Structures are given as C-alpha cells and as structure tokens.
Image (tube, rainbow, N blue to C red):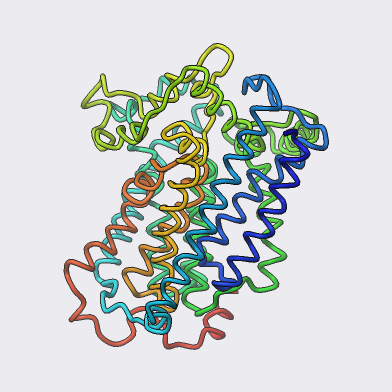
Amino acid sequence: MDIQSTMIIDVCLLVTGLWCILRVSEWSIFNPSLWWIALHAFGVTARLISLDLGSRSLAVIGIRSDTELVRAGIASDISLIGVVAACVYVAFSIRRDGHGIAASTTKDHSRLNPFVGYVISGLCLTIGTYALLKFGLVATAARARGVDVSAVNIGGFAESSYPLAIAGFAVQGALVLCAMRGFTRLRLLVFVTLLALTSVNLARTAFVLPAILAFLILQSRRHEHSIPLKWAIMIPVFGLIWFVFKPISNVIRAGEDPRTIVAEVSRYFAEQTTSEGSLDTELLDCQATYMAAADEQGKRYYGATLLPLLYLPIPRFVWPDKPLPNTWSWELSSSVRRMEPTGMTAQLSGESYVNFGWIGCVVIPCLYMLGMQTIYRRVRNQEIGSVTHWIYLILLISMVQVFRDGLNSLFVFPCVTYLPLVAWGGVSKVMGTRRVQGDPFNLHHSVTAQSRRSS
C-alpha cells in the first residue's frame, strides 16, 4: 500500500467515524470522541495529505521508506476505529440498560468547596508566581544579558523538573478564581497577565492547555455546549499564533530586538512550507520511526513504558541516579533513529504498538475512550461546581497530551502538572460541602450581564 491509498482510507475512516459518533452522541465541545477526531485530523490526516502532495520527513527522524509511514497511518486508523467503537458501545449500553435519561440528568452531590478553592488559589498565586519569576524570568534576563543560564544558582532544584511544574501553578490559581466567581475584568486581567508570563518562560503546553481550560470553564458556567460564532472565528487566529509562538518566544528569551520577531516568524513559515517542514508537523513520522525501531530490535514492552510512574514523585536531587522517565525511548534510539535526543513522541497509537503490537493499537485507545466517554455521559449536564465535572475538564484537556505523548500523560498531567486543580476536587470530596450555602459560584446571576462586564 502506498501513501495515497493510506490517505484515502484515512479520510474515509475519519468521515465515517465522525458520522457514527454524531449518530449515537451529540455535537459538544465536551465530547471526548470529537476531541480525538480533531486530534487525529491534525496529527494524522493532515500529515498524510501533505505527504501525498510531496512533503518529506526530516532527516533527523530517520524514516527509511514510505512503508514505515504507511504502517504508522494504518496503526493510527486502527486506533481511530477503537475510539469510535468505544463511543458507540457506551451509547448503546446506556440505551439498552434504560439509563439514558437517568445518566444524563444525574446530579453530583459532591460540590467543590469554595473555601478550599480560595486557599488553593492563594497558594498557587503566591508560590507559583514566585517560582515563575525565580526560575523563569531570572533565566530569561540572564540570556538577555548574555549570561550562561547554567550559572544561575537556584540550588538543588536545578536538577529537578519540579520548579517548572510549580511555576505553572500560578496561572492555575487564577483559573480557580475565575471558575468560582466568573471572568470579571480584574480576574481576567490577572489570568491573561500570568498566561503571558507563562507563555514566555515555560513550554507551550503550560499556557495553551490552561487557555483551553479557561474556555471550557466559561462555557460550563454558561451551560453552553457549542462554540459561539465569534470564538469560531478567533480559534484559527489563536491557532496561528500558537503555531508561530515558538520562534516568537525564542526571540523574547534571547532579548533580541522586537523587529527580529517578524523576521523569525517569516523564516519559520518558510521552513514549514518547504518539503521537509519541522517536528511540530510530523507527529505521524515520529510515530513511524518508533514503530520501525521496535520491529528492528524485536522489542515489545508489554506495559513497561509506564514503569517510570512508580518513581516519578521522587526529585532527582534526592535520587541522583533515578532512571530517566523515557528509558524505553533511549533504548529504541540509535544513530539513525534519534528519538529521545531530539524529543520525538510516539503518540498513543505508536506507544500501544510498541507495547502490544497491532492488537494494542485498537485495545488501548478503545479502553481509554471507554473511560472518558463513560465519565462524559455522567457529567455532561452538571454545573461547574460539581467535583466530577471539574475533574473531567482536567482529564479532557489532558487528552491532548495523552494523544501526543502516550499513557504516561494520563497520570502525569492530572497528578503533577494540574495537581492544584485536582487537589481542589479531592479535598472538597473528602471534606464534604454541608456548609456550602447560597450561590458561592455566582451561577444564578445573569450570564449576559457577567459577559458584558468581562468584555
């Protein structure tokens, strides 16, 4: 099979999968199956189309033939079939058991505790902002002055990723406030300011996913399940900004003249329009080289790729010899296929293949979507003050990283990256909410008036 045939099959499966999902479920920004369709279209379908039009893989990825790309496309399509099957199964099982109405109207009596929310928000805004300034702006200022960043003394924490995780807590503190009291001008200003600082000093994920979460919170407060027209117009603009933000942030970190930004963005666009592109647009190629490397070495890990989760909480300055989190990626890397040194990711489909072969490509995404779709069915009509609805929003935005990086992100992002947000739900669940009275989340006020104040 060649690239063109794979592309045609993929497009047909994508359209058929979308039709099947909409037949048994609804069009909603909270529907996880639709999220998977969108991620597949961006990471797989778009790439197959560009390959069919003549694009080539970067030499650093190490693709040796089109056959490797075809096999990666097939693996991704098998995963898509598993996801669609999970969505259909959940829908029909609910209807068969007669719980369709009950499941969609069940209220969660576990409520987010506003007092706990204020405490967590205050801690995140203070400690997180301090870490953002200490470990982010200090390094940025050092680069601007031409100082070696390694000379910036931040103690033993320099050997750990914990400072970066803590720095990401700042914007989460603002999100908690907005979730509780709404997106007023002051809260929105604080959130946008911290988001801007995060975008300059941390990875793109640290500000892109909170921005998406903020939109989901806004729509949850409004009881809206669709994307307004003005947002539908703005999303492509935000997507364009995200796409070119890497060269923009690099220029800012380097302390270059602002006029350099235009030149760097133009150069970056020129690179993307060439035949080879960049790693940002070649996720399928990275998956292909992981699968090919596993076959060449005859390795199957049978779930061992998740072992780093056992020692993840231990900081490296406490355990200097702690194994690397992606040991299996280093094992598969070679002089031709330099996956880990260049930061390639296998995607969930590729990781499933490395673990269990072709059967893993369909089973693991299917099981993952079974869980997500089941939770969605139970929380889709609940308010933002519900613990389960809040936790579901965190799991939903984590899907972006699960699709790209594999099952490790299913635990790392909720339990580490978004620890304050999950802690709010967990502590509220343990404490109970018998003392919560009135309208602590300001949900009974007019949404129109609130929106007007926020504009």
Q: Residue at x 47, y 61 (%)?
A: 190
Q: Is residue 129 visible?
A: no
Residue that protrudes farthest toward the top in the picture = 335
**x%, y% of residue 390?**
37, 66
Residue that protrudes farthest toward the right in the picture = 53
Q: Residue at x 44, y 64 (%)?
A: 373
Q: Quadrant of residue 95?
A: bottom left
Q: Quadrant of residue 237?
A: bottom right
Q: How many marks?
A: 0
Q: Is residue 155 left or right of residue 57?
A: left
Q: Quadrant of residue 111?
A: bottom left
313 in relation to 81, above or below: above
Q: Residue at x 47, y 74 (%)?
A: 220
**x%, y% of residue 170?**
39, 52
- 445 and 374: which is toward the camera: 374
Indicate the quadrant containing the N terminus: top left, top right, bottom left or bottom right. Answer: top right
Q: Is residue 140 visible?
A: yes
Q: Residue at x 42, y 60 (%)?
A: 372
**x%, y% of residue 15?**
69, 59
132 in relation to 328, above or below: below
**x%, y% of residue 273?**
80, 35
Indicate the quadrant containing the C terminus: top left, top right, bottom left or bottom right. Answer: bottom right
Q: Is residue 309 left or right of residue 328?
A: left
